[in-house]
Amino acid sequence: MESLNFDKFGNPIEIETYSDGRSKQVTVTDNSKNFVFLGDTYNIEVLRDCEDLKLYYSSSISKAVLKRDCYGRLLLFFFDDWVSGRMDLLWVVVADEADADEMVGVPRLSRLREPYIAADAGDWMIAHGEITSYSNSRG
């Protein structure tokens, strides 16, 4: 079952409820707006300002870095610059450094493990995550 709503910033969100009771939220926005992710306010600047903790690899066309955001979450950041000129950005929430170490080695399509934020270098962002994982005391 799916329903379309809007977050407090006016971004469209889709909520999917599964037969086992889990709910997933997908938020679509552009790179200039705030959006809600895991109960906190994010935007492209919050993601760009994350603290670098561990560089896995870096070249002119790809990069992988373990980061910590301003909320204390660990994010594994991937950058890929495709031959077509499309630049993909991905921030995947990881449990710890060992989780990030394992995730770095998986194929690109397998990196889309929720919760995550994906974007291109141009104008869009999309955030995926289970609603049950959003509980946090920061409100």
Image (cartoon, rainbow, N blue to C red):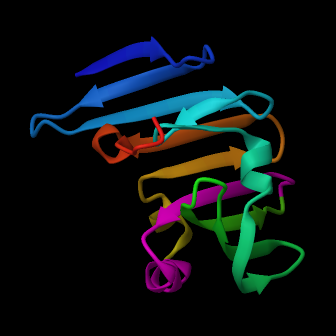
Q: Looking at the picture, how far across and down is residue 129, in whole percent?
A: 41, 44
Q: Residue at x 73, y 47 (%)?
A: 46
The magenta span reads 84-105
Q: In the rendered structure, does residue 67 fall within the stretch colored magenta? A: no
| Relative side of 5 to 77, left or right | left
Residue, far front? 137
Q: Residue at x 75, y 74 (%)?
A: 63
Q: Looking at the picture, how far across and down is residue 83, in whole percent?
A: 84, 62
Query: Can you say whether 100 is above or below 132 in the image?
Result: below
Q: Looking at the picture, how far across and down is residue 39, in whole percent?
A: 47, 37
> Which quadrant of the view contains residue 92?
bottom right
Query: Can you say whether 60 is above or below 116 in the image?
Result: below
Residue nearest the viewer, comparing 114 with 59: 114
Q: Residue at x 87, y 54 (%)?
A: 85
> Which quadrant of the view contains residue 19?
top left
| Relative side of 29 to 99, left or right | right
Query: Can you say whether 15 is above or below 121 in the image?
Result: above
Q: In the rendered structure, does residue 90 fall within the stretch colored magenta? A: yes
Position of the N terminus by quadrant: top left
Q: Looking at the picture, how far across and down is residue 106, in whole percent?
A: 49, 78
